[in-house]
Image (cartoon, helix red, strand yellow):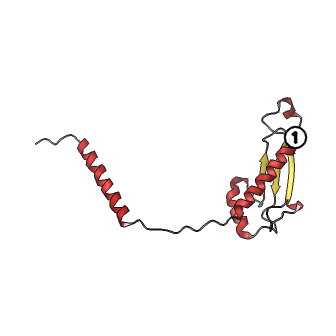
Amino acid sequence: MRINDDITLQDWELTESFTRSSGPGGQNVNKVSSAVELRFEAERSPNLPAPVKTRLKRLAGRRWSLDGALILRVEDTRSQARNREIARARLVELIQQALKRPKPRIGTRPTLASKRRRLESKAHRADIKALRNAPKPD
């Protein structure tokens, strides 16, 4: 499976299994295995660099198994072939997201004017709340 110009996944890295799915399909749901479980051996993949693997693991969340595989389960449609296409498209999309390096955040300091505005608004709010109190007896 081709991800981009540099990365192509081998057949041994992908495993598909089919099970009966819940959802739409009527009586057909009980007979046909239309749900697809796509398993991608991400940790053992020689085609993905280490930083991409760590980003992919973070993006995958609980879809990442303990043995380092990414498991995608799709049961969106009644068609097994369509579910396979959707699963593969989602895998490609996840890997492409993991390929993008996040931009490092540059910390900034608030300007003097913004500090003054913040303090003035706090003082104004405090005055409004102070006026809500009952007047003190003399």
Tell me: residue 76, above or below residue 25: below
x and y percentages locating residue 69 in the rendered image: 78, 58
x and y percentages locating residue 7 in the rendered image: 80, 66
The residue lying toward the viewer, choosing from 68 and 34, is 34
Tell me: residue 94, above or below residue 26: below
x and y percentages locating residue 75 in the rendered image: 79, 42
Under tag 1, what secondary structure?
Answer: loop
Among all residues in the image, which is located at the extreme left?
138
Tell me: residue 31, above or below residue 100: above
Residue at 82%, 33% in the rendered image: 25
The residue that label 1 is drawn on is: 33
* Amino acid type for the residue under numbered disc 1: Ser
Please tell me in which quadrant of the rendered image residue 56 appears. Answer: bottom right
x and y percentages locating residue 86 in the rendered image: 80, 48
Residue at 73%, 57% in the rendered image: 94
Residue at 86%, 51% in the rendered image: 16
For the N terminus, give its image quadrant.
bottom right
For the C terminus, give its image quadrant.
top left
63 displayed left or right of 119:
right
The residue lying toward the viewer, choosing from 16 and 108, is 108
Q: Residues within 10 Å of mark 1 (few under 14, many from 20)?
A: some
94 displayed left or right of 28:
left
Residue at 26%, 49% in the rendered image: 127
Please tell me in which quadrant of the rendered image residue 97 appears. Answer: bottom right
79 displayed left or right of 108:
right
